[in-house]
Structure formats: C-alpha cells, structure tokens
Amino acid sequence: GEYGWDAGGLARDWFNRLGVELANAAEKEDGHFKVWPDKTLGPRPYVNLFTDLCAIGRLTGLAVWFGIPLPIPVGSVLCKFMLGIPLGPVDVQQLDPDFYQFRVLPVSKPGEQERLH
C-alpha cells in the first residue's frame, strides 16, 4: 500500500456529518435535540437520553480540542448553562417567548417589567 498523510480532512468530514445528522434529526422532531423558538438546538426535554447526550458532549469537546467546526447551532442559553453563567429573564424570553409573556411578565413587580427587557 501507499503511505499518506491526512491533513484532517477525514476528521473534519466525520464531525461535519455528525453535526449535520444531529441537526437534521432535530428538525424532523426526532433524535437527541429539539429546535427551540430561536432556531437553535437544545436537549430534547422529558427524554431520558443522558448517556447519549454525555457522549455527544464528549464528541463536541473533541471537536473543540482539535479546532474542528461542528455545525450544531447552540444558543446563548445553552452556552451560558455549560459555562456556569447565571441565566436571567432575557434568556428565558429567548428560549420560550410564550412562557415569558404569559408566566414571567404577569408575576413581575410593577416597574420591573421595563428592567426585564
């Protein structure tokens, strides 16, 4: 056989296909992720796929480690959660606009609604 040198093309292609397939499954309302109202992906709620999500997280970590782009659109809410940054009302509004409008705003204190935006 011939010897060759891989410049990362195979790894990039593999990670790209992984990300595309995860996103496609989410758009079809199947798989491990859900498309949120802001068109980003997040874990599908009420499904016990913790081991699978952990594996996807490790693969995401490998992609970051090797500097390979992974085409999974994650929103600021998930990024903040992973980085341990506190979430606020604006994040709730981004994740679920209906919940924010009909649950958060009605119970906020007078004068506080302007501050929440």
Image: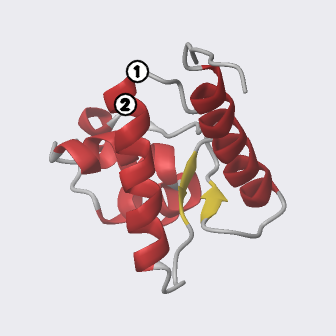
Q: Nearer the viewer, residue 19 or 111?
A: 19
Q: Position of residue 7 (x, y in %)?
A: 55, 13
- Is 34 rendered above or below residue 82? below
Residue at the image position 53 percent from the left and 24 percent from the top: 69
Residue at the image position 39 percent from the left and 54 percent from the top: 57
Residue lying furthest right = 28
Tag 2 and tag 1, C-beta contact below 8 Å = yes
Q: In this rendering, would 89 be left or right of 8?
A: left
Q: In this rendering, would 37 be left or right of 52?
A: right
Query: Which element is circle 1 on?
Result: loop
Q: Which mark is residue 79?
A: none
Q: Residue 64 carries which label?
A: 2
* Quadrant of the image occupied by residue 65: top left
Q: In this rendering, would 37 be left or right of 61?
A: right
Q: Residues within 10 Å of mark 2 (few under 14, many from 20)?
A: few
Which amino acid is tagged 2?
Answer: Val
* Distance Cα–Cα, label 2 vs label 1: 5 Å
Q: Residues within 10 Å of mark 1 (few under 14, many from 20)?
A: few
Q: Quadrant of the C terminus?
A: top left
Which amino acid is tagged 1?
Answer: Gly
Query: Which element is circle 2 on?
Result: helix
Q: Where is residue 78 in the image (x, y as percent from the top left)?
A: 38, 47
Q: Which of 14 and 104 is in front in this view?
A: 14
- Is 67 rendered above or below residue 60? above
Q: Where is residue 19 in the image (x, y as percent from the top left)?
A: 64, 42
Q: Is residue 77 visible?
A: no
Q: Residue 67 carries which label?
A: 1
* Quadrant of the image occupied by residue 31: bottom right
